[in-house]
Image: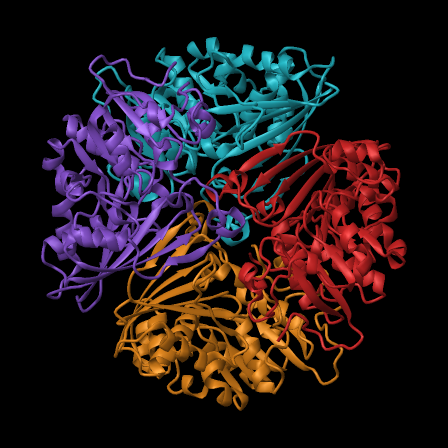
Chain colours: A orange, B purple, C red, D cyan
Amino acid sequence: MSGAATTDASAIDAVVIGAAGYIGGELVRLLLGHPRVRLRAASSRTFAGQRVDGVHPNLRGATDLVFTPEEEAPACDVLFLAAGHGRSVELLRRHGENARIVVDLGGDLRIVDPEAHRRAYPDDDRPEGLARSFTAGWPEARRDALRASDRISVPGCMAMAAILALHPLAAAGAVEPDVTVDARTGSSGAGATAGDHNLHAERSGAMRVFAPRGHRHEGEIAQATGLRVRMTATGVEAVRGVQVLCRARAREPVDERAVRAIYREAYQREPFVRVVAQKRGIYRYPEPKILLGSNYCDVGFAVSDDGRDVVAIAALDNLMKGGAGNAVQCVNIRMGWPERLGLEFAGLHPL
Amino acid sequence: MSGAATTDASAIDAVVIGAAGYIGGELVRLLLGHPRVRLRAASSRTFAGQRVDGVHPNLRGATDLVFTPEEEAPACDVLFLAAGHGRSVELLRRHGENARIVVDLGGDLRIVDPEAHRRAYPDDDRPEGLARSFTAGWPEARRDALRASDRISVPGCMAMAAILALHPLAAAGAVEPDVTVDARTGSSGAGATAGDHNLHAERSGAMRVFAPRGHRHEGEIAQATGLRVRMTATGVEAVRGVQVLCRARAREPVDERAVRAIYREAYQREPFVRVVAQKRGIYRYPEPKILLGSNYCDVGFAVSDDGRDVVAIAALDNLMKGGAGNAVQCVNIRMGWPERLGLEFAGLHPL
Amino acid sequence: MSGAATTDASAIDAVVIGAAGYIGGELVRLLLGHPRVRLRAASSRTFAGQRVDGVHPNLRGATDLVFTPEEEAPACDVLFLAAGHGRSVELLRRHGENARIVVDLGGDLRIVDPEAHRRAYPDDDRPEGLARSFTAGWPEARRDALRASDRISVPGCMAMAAILALHPLAAAGAVEPDVTVDARTGSSGAGATAGDHNLHAERSGAMRVFAPRGHRHEGEIAQATGLRVRMTATGVEAVRGVQVLCRARAREPVDERAVRAIYREAYQREPFVRVVAQKRGIYRYPEPKILLGSNYCDVGFAVSDDGRDVVAIAALDNLMKGGAGNAVQCVNIRMGWPERLGLEFAGLHPL
Amino acid sequence: MSGAATTDASAIDAVVIGAAGYIGGELVRLLLGHPRVRLRAASSRTFAGQRVDGVHPNLRGATDLVFTPEEEAPACDVLFLAAGHGRSVELLRRHGENARIVVDLGGDLRIVDPEAHRRAYPDDDRPEGLARSFTAGWPEARRDALRASDRISVPGCMAMAAILALHPLAAAGAVEPDVTVDARTGSSGAGATAGDHNLHAERSGAMRVFAPRGHRHEGEIAQATGLRVRMTATGVEAVRGVQVLCRARAREPVDERAVRAIYREAYQREPFVRVVAQKRGIYRYPEPKILLGSNYCDVGFAVSDDGRDVVAIAALDNLMKGGAGNAVQCVNIRMGWPERLGLEFAGLHPL
């Protein structure tokens, strides 16, 4: 047993940098189970030399891999950068040449416009034009570009949810440009490094408005949808899971049938977006808990009686469709493989 | 040891109808600990004849009371109606004459305007004018009226939070009339009757948008603030606790200092509203978990850089300031007692 | 898209009775994803005529199946009985003839000895000898029998964990016959029917000793291990997951190396039992949360300094290795398929 | 408003060292609400100069106190040492002379026998005889000694629960000397310092056996009861709360009536121990969730049919009867005040 679980001779070699983090660990899990990928290395600065399953105990029995130091990450076909915000430029410089395909999961290269990027990431020093060479890891709108792209930047978790909720409405010209996004998130989105903010006794049972305005995913959502976005973000009791509740004003009065048609049109052939807006039942709108471990984003909606207000709701697992799962979906597209490969898990009920 | 814990000869007699519910149980707890109140009876249709501490085990050792059948509720000085929505009119008819003061905790008499009431409670059949004889149990704005009122209607939990967040802004003329309210709530708000909606395995870890539009507290908030309210409500993982996140548009650009001044002016002498909007710390905005068991409502805010958008946040314990605690505060006012009497508990950290 | 997801012509037909329950839903999920199985019907008395994904929303997009009435369950190759305790005999009578293989997941047929069975299930009326015709669904000890058995009775969730923890010690003659089992369990083990016992506000955050003595899994553990078992069971805050902490007295003083050797010998070739007893780390003993959705049972141990006391710990997902997953593993063995087929999911970290 | 909330001229002055921790914060809360105590200072090495309500946000509005540096702790009538294990000896040396009464909440002085102490706290260097000058803060058995003692050592949280469960049985000579204790605990017991062990994403939903043998509270329980104790400790999902499940072997067969009589005799006049062992109901055995914030320890039991095995169960809030609340109860006894003073809170239902 080694890190490389597949025996397919045509498989490609993959490396994960930042593999001890939560998105990194999810990439390792998915790549070990992917029939066309050989995981060659999982690197970590903090845990180099230690077993991967010591940090990610769900992988006991699935791999004997040991974390490699970052600087020893080997050449590969696809390199995943999951070391966190602010490190992508440096890692690209050092490792970019050694990989045919690079998938970045940090925030550094998501926003193309330099000024909008600086608003979201003030400390960031980014070479002019670098972000422009990356394709957004947004399969539902960039599938064709992804097929031909060797540089992919995966959206942020809350941004991905909001974009999938809002883009069809914006693209159909159905809503006014001013929208609000109220995001709720579990604790894993804050990463695997211990601090007062994610201490169990403080974070447990929280309804913590950590961003009442100006959350940095605003710029990403605006870029993708062309809308003007005001966003709040609240930590609620959960480890995994993101839900966004978006409000838009209809340009012309609409009814639920019309909105449903817009979403159906946008997503009916999508393998990982489901339209969920039912008349009854406790799961009649999108809810993260039944999505954990799956790559689905569920999207739902409601319309006010006068047809002027549209509420759009989306839910996903922040480490999956909001990170690692979405990255694997992009690689599947890039390689011309079936899009669901290695991403078949349906989620659990109850959980 | 009996139900009546006080030995004060000048104490008044109280009765709770609907005492086996969650708000009813909280009333029993508060009244047993209140130095000026003798709890004469706790009634329940379902549990008549059983011990109160069998249903509310936190009261073991505090009372030997047995639930009385509703129809045997004795005459008293103050009668609390906590039997749930749709029963207040009937209970008033049967028991109203036997009590000097009636405090209603159902939704039936909160909205005065008949049409607005019917929108919120379509099945309700309510005598013309009855609601008008009740004073809103909203101490911060109705204190003088409450001193002289023998009929008090306590606001809904989410409504109370939103009213306390929005009213100062509306009263100061600082915001445009169109506002949104996104409420998050624990499971106790749905009551003590078991059903699929509050089954632990389904409700645990939920982010359940149970009202994406048209929540019936909209009418109550509109009535209290004069604003046009669009509201959503989401169940999150918690037993107790409500948080509202409200968005308003400033009529003229404002800064945080100006908004802070509005709230300070409104609440600086209030015993149970705290203005919480700090630059740092994990509890820098209102959060229910540190309020559980207390009668506080914490109110906070943020303002966008351009001064046009105001986000107002409020948090409370739905069974306390959102129900039983607020009811006791109203009675303290009515009786001319110190307002904090029996409501001194500060909340726990951590929890 | 239909209930039958596989296109393998050699696949077998499966039917689940009691498919709206939690173990039933898990069976549906696993069978829909199993490459050698066609799920022909999912039956439910309560939900007949409704969509399966209305009850199990994680299956949206995975199936269009509608629950069939129990009496219309079609003939099939393998029939799973997941309708709960007390119904297996009746269901066998009605449907047993129509299925080549029957896998029972209720408690009715687990204990062979009539008297021991009556102690555990006093209300149960069971034909003499019926239990004897069933093979215990305990792959680690009954693999050869399972290969040839058309009647399989899957152990209870807490029993399975305790048996996997204790049997190697008992089989090796390493411990005295008197043992204790302290089991902790999530709420899904109590089923999908709402009641006061699983109301969210009451069950949330619980440490509820619901069986301080005489839990009915005692008889099952005793039967499998030959030990005398005293068991307690406590509900703790979790939806899925069981952990048992077992205490035994060593016959001769032992050290950790010796105990590790016993478990290694027992489980080194087992696909779904992992020995977890490490010197460091927060997951150094078995813990359910990293196993949810997986079919693993992790087993660990500690030994007192004097070598006389052995603590054995096991953890599993009660709906998987404690129910549906174990049932599928048994069918894989029965059919001669690879044992991991359809059970590859590794579990999530963090969760 | 200052730290000293009381206006009673006869009140005593109190100081808390280690006031930024969880037990320290609870002491601050209780002392601020205590009618006979003036809180003169709350000290912290880490947070000196910062507001107390910045760390303990439940105290907003209750105090304007700022943490003082430890070395500036003023002289006082009663000094509480809550700085954690390993610091009591040093703090006594520096501050012991400045306080009439010292209440230590660390582990350093609980076990009198030097060898037993070293087994529990191997790194500890303790002057010969120091522990002997302290009275155990165990009101139920040491009330008379506490009335006359100026040096009090409060038991550990799990130890207190186990002692209250086991001591009556031991004192009555009803059980054999070998007992086991299985303790379950929330995360606040591990303190307020962030680390991997209490990271929310890892600790959430845990069933973490962090001590399968040799937990250091064993020595304390043995000292108090005279029994031979084997103990395990497991972290479960909770912030506050401890539950112990103890097993003992009856010396002569007993029935539940006899055991109930033993507990009644021991605790019928105790203000903070309730005997809870009922035939029905979901709270029929002791459970921490209804005790949070209260100073109660609930004790319950079950007996096997043959009368040979006794299971004793106890639950408490680890920061209250397991720490700060118990310390205040001891001071009430020492001062000759009513024992419930400042400790009236009953706990919440539901929570």
The answer to whether residue C75 is above or below residue C193 is below
Q: Position of residue B135 (x, y in %)?
A: 15, 39
Q: Is residue D193 in view? A: yes
- Splitting the image into 4 quarters, where does residue A308 fall? bottom left
- Splitting the image into 4 quarters, where does residue A125 fall? bottom left
Seen at 39% across and 45% down, the residue is B190
Q: Is residue D17 in view? A: no
The answer to whether residue D42 is above or below residue C99 is above
Q: Quadrant of the N terminus of chain D?
A: top left
Left or right: A178, with D27 as reference point: left
Left or right: B173, with B100 as reference point: left
Q: Quadrant of the C terminus of chain D?
A: top left
Seen at 53% across and 91% down, the residue is A148
Q: Position of residue A121 (x, y in %)?
A: 35, 72
The answer to whether residue B56 is above or below residue A345 is above
Q: Nearer the viewer, residue A330 or A313?
A: A313
The answer to whether residue D36 is above or below residue B22 is above
Left or right: A271, with C273 as reference point: left
Q: Nearer the viewer, residue B308 or C66?
A: C66
Q: Position of residue A164 (x, y in %)?
A: 42, 75
Q: Position of residue B243 (x, y in %)?
A: 32, 50
